[in-house]
Amino acid sequence: MKRPAPTNREKVMKDGDFLVSKTDPKGIITYGNEIFIEISGYQEDELLGTQHSIIRHPDMPKAVFKLLWDRVKNKKEIFAYVKNLAKDGSFYWVFANITPDFNLKGEIRGFYSVRRKPTKKGLDAISDIYTKLLSAEKMSGVSESEKLLGEILKELGGTYDEIIMSLQK
């Protein structure tokens, strides 16, 4: 499926909305709730069986997704601000909680993502950070962006989790 060209049109989540999706271990969508399907602009049959990256917005730094995947593949949850791309090219921001789903043997059988509306405070801060990370990636690659993220966190005086959670308060 061809990815849409991004536009400057924003969709904003409602305060009480939760977007839920589930993927297999390789990131293939196996479930999406009605609100997720609606805001993405895709039909359910267009999403199921497709890589979750279908909604990845090009404004998202690859270093953030690397951090996210490293964390969940190591059986840990992560919270993150994510800018997604809808089928019509519009975008929408989410505050995501991604968790691994385990079988009875403790092996990862997939991932859940539950997203809610991000705070204005969080978006203001994270937009600036993501712009810097994306610029570093374009100039010097993902490893430089990861290094810059570490420097930003050190400057802010906290771990990734501490900073992200403080932005959502």
Image (cartoon, grey):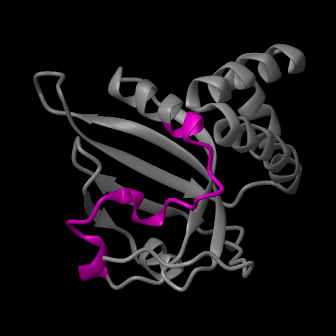
* 110 lies above or below 91: above
Q: Nearer the viewer, residue 150 or 41?
A: 150
Q: Residue at x 81, y 52 (%)?
A: 123
The image quarter in which residue 84 lies: bottom right
Horizontal side of 62 relative to 136 (left or right) equals left
Query: Where is residue 49 drawn, in percent x and y?
Result: 20, 66
Query: Which quarter shows the N terminus?
Result: bottom left
Q: Nearer the viewer, residue 3 or 166?
A: 3
Query: Where is residue 105 drawn, in percent x and y?
Result: 10, 22
Q: Is residue 50 magenta?
A: yes
Q: Residue at x 56, y 78 (%)?
A: 5
Q: Residue at x 69, y 74 (%)?
A: 14
Q: Residue at x 30, y 59 (%)?
A: 51
Q: How many marks?
A: 0
Query: Where is residue 102 drawn, in percent x and y?
Result: 22, 32
In the picture as drawn, the residue positioned furthest to the left comes out as: 105
Query: Which quarter shows the C terminus?
Result: top right
* 110 lies above or below 45: above
Residue interval drawn in magenta: 44-65
Horizontal side of 80 relative to 8 (left or right) equals left
Horizontal side of 32 relative to 127 (left or right) equals left
In the picture as drawn, the residue positioned furthest to the front comes out as: 139
Query: Where is residue 98 drawn, in percent x and y?
Result: 46, 41
Horizontal side of 155 relative to 49 (left or right) equals right
